Amino acid sequence: MSDLFSPIEPPEMASARPLADRLRPRTLAEVTGQEHLTGEDGALTRMIASGSLGSMIFWGPPGTGKTTVARLLSGEAGLAFEQISAIFSGVADLKKVFDSARARRMSGRQTLLFVDEIHRFNRAQQDSFLPVMEDGTVILVGATTENPSFELNAALLSRARVLTFKPHDEASLEELLRRAEQAEGKSLPLDEDARATLLRMADGDGRAALTLAEEVWRAARRDEIFDANGLQNIVQRRAPVYDKGQDGHYNLISALHKSVRGSDPDAALYYLCRMFDAGEDPLYIGRRLVRMAVEDIGLADPQALVICNAAKDAYDYLGSPEGELALAEACVYVATAPKSNAVYAAYKSAMRAAKENGSLLPPKHILNAPTKLMKGEGYGEGYRYDHDEPDAFSGQDYFPEKMGRKTFYDPPERGFERELRKRLEWWAKLRRERNS
């Protein structure tokens, strides 16, 4: 057996620890599945070589090595390592950690502070990290399974680099099983199909793969070899019908989305249930339904977004299986709603215009003038307060002068957007009359 993954404590103590813990890598080079970060040309490898580390956010699913990599990073950079969890820590805990880091810094040693589930800290708690990041008291490494763009403050994100951890693919999970077999000194008692089934059960989670392997060794009798059915019986877990990180996942979510877009509630429900049955995360489905509401329905039925958000929250409140009915209700609603991508198309057109004309200033008459100097420069001059105008509409031009008026939003005559089109046509008529 290789010394690389062998336990450092006496064998009787090592065997009492979970396999996943015993096989934790001891160097960044040993980390599997994240070669884009820890490989020879990986982002973290280059940081270590440069001798300069900055604060980072590790974003990725469970079991991909975020905690392990943070600990190894501190060791290879010669930093003190502190770890807290946002689930169990509050302001008092943060203050203690910051005070310890300051004392350490006074003696010439910097601290790498690893914060698990950092997205669970509220806005004020996230802001408390800013001073100690800026003055170098700590190098913050936050771990999150949620999209940092939505869950973390912009101020925090502007001071930290986001590094994405990928789910383990089949090759890296197989490597973990090989290491486990090497450490245990025996092969897994699984036939070829059962081994492939175990990899699918792990679903990209390295810790889960090693835990399943441990369960198999505990259950196996002498000379017993499990097939796929036997494996599922002993671990009491179904193999997913498709790999959530691969083609099956994307094929089914695509089929669901296109069925909704095509106003076919029966097909949409069928694919929704296929995904539930395969073990897909219902909150992921909820997020996709919200996306469908804003992309394919938009303002043709503004209630679609409200209902999809409510269904997502209802599932979060009820859990499975009761909450799945709320998602099914939202699925049927969006499939039967009038369809419009007018806002989606308008947003893309406006974004292109913003990139092309990002340096143009708004016209001075719509800018506030809080100082005498700004008033003297013509800020706010000539602005007409719409509520004081006939029909509460002044007809002023709000685009930058060099850009001229543009039309991005063109609502179709369907659903609620039929009414919006009437309003826009009425305002266009008044604008022409008042500016002629």
Image: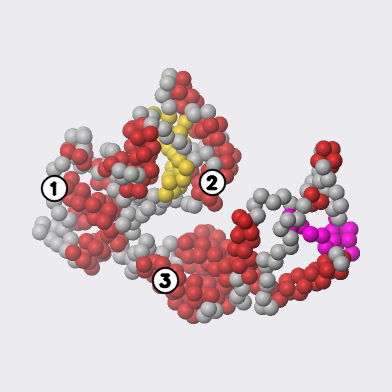
Disc 2 residue crowd, few under 14, some 14–19, many 20+, Cα 10 Å = many
Marks 1 and 3, how far apart at CA: 41 Å
Residue 252 numbered mark, or none: 3
> Tag 1: residue type?
Gly
Q: Name the residue at 30% across, 43% down.
A: 40
Between 229 and 351, the one lying in front of the other is: 351
Q: Residue furthest front?
A: 402
Q: CA distance from mark 2 to mark 1?
A: 45 Å
The secondary structure type at the circle numbered 3 is: helix
* Sequence-first disc among 2 and 1: 2
Residue at label 2?
152
- Secondary element at tag 2: loop
Q: Are marks 3 and 2 in contact (CB under 8 Å)?
A: no
In this rendering, the answer to whether 217 lies above or below 98 is below
Q: Quadrant of residue 395?
A: bottom right
The reply to whether residue 272 is in sight is no
Q: Is residue 394 magenta?
A: yes
**119 vs 295: above or below:** above
Image quarter (top left, top right, bottom left or bottom right) of the C terminus: bottom right
The amino acid type, in three-letter code, at marker 3 is Leu
**Residue 353 placement, left or right of 48:** right
Quadrant assignment, res 273: bottom left
Could you tell me which secondary element the residue under label 1 belongs to? loop
Instruction: Return the x and y of residue 267 as percentages of the image width and height.
Output: 47, 79
Front-most of 124 and 255?
255
Percent across and percent down for residue 368 are 79, 46
Q: Which residues are magenta?
A: 385-400
Query: Which mark's residue is nearer the viewer, 1 or 3?
Result: 3
Q: Which mark is residue 185?
A: 1
Q: Residue sitting at 57 percent across and 71 percent down?
A: 296
Disc on the earlier residue, 1 or 3: 1
The residue type indicated by label 2 comes to: Leu
